[in-house]
Image (tube, grey):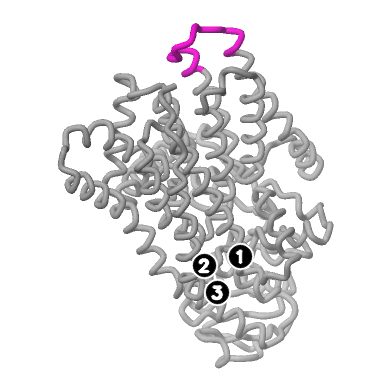
Amino acid sequence: MGTEQKFSYRSLLAIPLFLLCNAALFPYLKNVITPDDASYLRIGEYYAAGDFQNALNAYWSPLGSILGAAFARTGIEGIFLYKYILIGMGCLTLFLISVLCTRFDLHKKYHLLVTAGLVPFLLYACYQQLTGDMIQLPFVLLYCIIVLSGSYRKHVLYPALCGLIIALAFYAKFYSLYFMLLHFIVINVSFFLYGKEQKDYRSFLGHTLSGTIVALACIAPWVYCVAQKYGTPMLNYTGKINASWFLLGHRELKDGMEVFLPPASVSSYNYWEEPMSVQGPYRHFWESAFLAARQVFLVIRSVRNFVQFLGDFSPFVPFIYAYTLFRLFTAKLPSALLTVSAWMFIIMPLGYFLIVMEYRFLLLICIFCFAFGITLLQQYVFPQLRNKAARTLILGLFALSFAIHPVYELIMTPAYGNKVVGNANELKKLQLKGSYCINSSNPSTFIQSYLIRMQLYGIEQLDAPKDLVLAEIRKYHIDYYFYDKSQPDLFPCDRSFLQLVDSTTVSGYAVYKIVQ
């Protein structure tokens, strides 16, 4: 397994640094909220109210909403709630990374550099509101710590504990199950094939099966509840619906839905709380030659984006990734410990190549790349450099390269959040009740509907014929039309059925009452 380093208490200094940075940034970034978080918050309200029929959701992972429901009882305002939760997750993550550093063959003196160097990443994750990703992160790190401990193969309890952690990571973010379970099987195979101990088939099977069975057993109640609500057993429909959307380039809607997408239920503010409410038939790449060709195109594009995004985070990341792959498949890495660890950030992105690659999917990968990069510098570069100043300069440039992208994103973030929340606060002053539509398909409209507590009929066709738009407005009995002046007007000519409510209070908006 390699020699484990002693725990460095100095590495925990990154936690007060992280908290100080949050204290400084919070006044500027407090209004940032994402459409996903608006859905988590609303589902959390269902949990808090005991409305489990609406709370149970196979698109949004439940742990984020359950945490939101628990912390909401403290009286914290919704748009701030997940920031506090994610800051707590960030502190826990830094502690677990400090422990994980002892599992790598990384000298104790570099542990603080790893934790402090990752502070910009965690700030970025907190204020970009990567809720599911951040909540799963401590579980993934705890799983790695157990797997890479010297005691892992000595008792069946440890793989069983890994199974429990994999299940908890699933409840934090559905995608975790597929990657972590695959990784769990791979590392057990790796230990069996490359471990120094004598190969023991019974131990290998016992460890693999115990962890897998525990993970599946802990998820079974969720599968049962989902089957009761949706009428079919499934873990979730997140991957299926996302794959279908990206394969087609648009949503496949239910029959009868053309221009507007109604809220998921009578108590929902928009369809984004439960995307299945508007989803028609799922499409798969094997259905036609065209879709198969498009799937190949999407995979190529995702791989290209993956390489590009890695380079955007740091020019060192593609090199570290490629070098680790090369060493993994052509020669043994310096220890079995690193061999096993390498599989984690190689396996994590594979599933996304089938759908779409986004920046947020690289959070875990970059954490491992940062730690791996310093480990590789220690083992292959620093032994050739006797000049301490040169080693310090290389480490400084390496850490700085990882900080540039998240710091840039944090600088660019506040204006967006302030505009969305500011407009919502102005709209609330109008004291409107009922439902509305808007001439914008921007995802910020989901945030707006949650903040103003009105039902949004999301628009699917901005260029639909005006008579069809009017017919659907009357079909759904929509009460208001919010005209975003930065977007094409749905009714540029005939406004005979619109009664102006306000055109000055809300920046960039005109609000009309629809006369049915």
Q: Which residue is mark 1?
A: 259
- What x and y, as percent, mark residue 165? 63, 36
Left or right of 349 in this view: 221: right
- What x and y, as percent, mark residue 72? 72, 64
Dot 1 amino acid type: Val
Q: Residue at x 73, y 67 (%)?
A: 74
Q: Secondary structure at mark 1?
A: loop
Image quadrant assignment for residue 239:
top right
Res 276 seen here: yes
Specify which label sits upstream in the sequence, 1 or 3: 1
Dot 3 amino acid type: Asn
Specify which label sits upstream in the sequence, 1 or 2: 1
As rendered, which of 188 and 8 lies closer to the eye?
8
Q: Main secondary structure of the magenta part?
A: helix
Q: Is residue 256 above or below residue 201?
A: below
Label 2, residues with CA under 10 Å away: few <14, some 14-19, many ≥20: few
Q: Quadrant of the N terminus?
A: top left
- Disc 1 to disc 2, how far (Cα)? 15 Å
Q: Residue at x 71, y 49 (%)?
A: 57
Instruction: Tell me which segment is drawn in magenta.
Output: 189-204
Q: Which residue is mark 3?
A: 439
CB atoms at circles 2 and 3 under 8 Å apart?
Answer: no
Label 1, residues with CA under 10 Å away: few <14, some 14-19, many ≥20: many
Q: Residue 458 in magenta?
A: no
Label 3, residues with CA under 10 Å away: few <14, some 14-19, many ≥20: many
Dot 2 amino acid type: Asn
Q: Which residue is mark 2?
A: 442
Q: Which mark is residue 448?
A: none
Q: Is residue 190 above or below residue 217?
A: above
Q: Residue at x 57, y 55 (%)?
A: 131
